[in-house]
Image (cartoon, grey):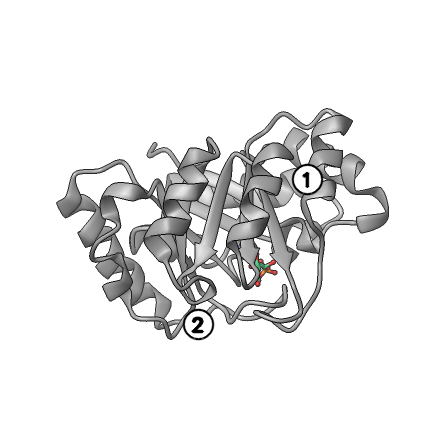
Amino acid sequence: MKDFLIAPSILSADFARLGEDVAKVLAAGADVVHFDVMDNHFVPNLTFGAPVCQALRDYGITAPIDVHLMVKPVDRIIPDFAKAGATMITVHVEATDHLDRTLQLIKECGCQAGVVFNPATPLHHLDYVMDKIDMILLMSVNPGFGGQSFIPSTLDKLREVRKRIDESGRAIRLEIDGGVKADNIREIAEAGADMFVAGSAIFSQPDYKVEIDKMRAELAK
Ligand code: DX5
Ligand code: ZN
């Protein structure tokens, strides 16, 4: 099977018992922890910052932490997340005036770097950064909230990005975020994604393993 990563979004986890819940979802077979940082400015919601990432590391979480920054301005918070144990850091193109500089900063901090596209953000922002990124994240909902429905036009966008990645010959991950469930994950994978964020679909279930296994079974088809 292709190398697919499942990344539960802890936006839908139990905040009162975050360490425990994250350990539980990893034990259920998740690969990566997706960490949604919202500032009530770039997006209309407020979540958590670098100390919470550090707290997960201190609790003993060793899995990769994928920090999705929905924060503007974004640069000054990047070193904080790198120090707090982030593995990957992704930034929205609209959150920085100097995308190249921001990506360089993430790399200098020792993290994998990625660019995030909102559903209506055009892909030309990739033109001069393909050699500086480890991942591309396509939003399949408008950012800010979990539990929204997958926007179907994202499938065409995924196909376009997959083509660009393949043509570049680089090992760039293609991550999809928003409205991913067991019943659409296969179609999303066929369009080119290889890293799947899922929040509500996993955390709303009593047994996370049942849902993650269902997703993997769809991906194996
Ligand atoms: C939305 C976040 C997503 C969100 C996904 O702004 O970036 O990671 O939590 O949640 P679901 O899977 O419920 O759409
Ligand atoms: Zn996210």
Q: Quadrant of the C terminus?
A: top left
Residue at 71% in and 38% down:
22
Secondary structure category for the residue under label 1: helix
Question: Which residue in the structure is indicated by mark 2?
Answer: 151
Label for residue 53? 1
Residue sitting nearer the eye, 84 or 8? 84
**Residue 151: percent from left, percent from top:** 44, 72
Q: Amino acid at mark 1?
A: Cys
Residue at 26% in and 57% down:
126
Q: Residues within 10 Å of mark 2 (few under 14, many from 20)?
A: some
Q: Is residue 99 something one can see in this rendering? A: yes
Label for residue 17? none
Q: Quadrant of the N terminus?
A: top left
Image position of 11 (left or right of 6): right
**Residue 35: percent from left, percent from top:** 61, 47
**Residue 139: percent from left, percent from top:** 45, 63
The answer to which image quadrant residue 210 occupies is top right
Residue at 63% in and 63% down:
146
The image shows residue 144, relative to residue 75, as above or below, that is below
Image position of 95 (left or right of 43): left
Q: Residue furthest right?
A: 16
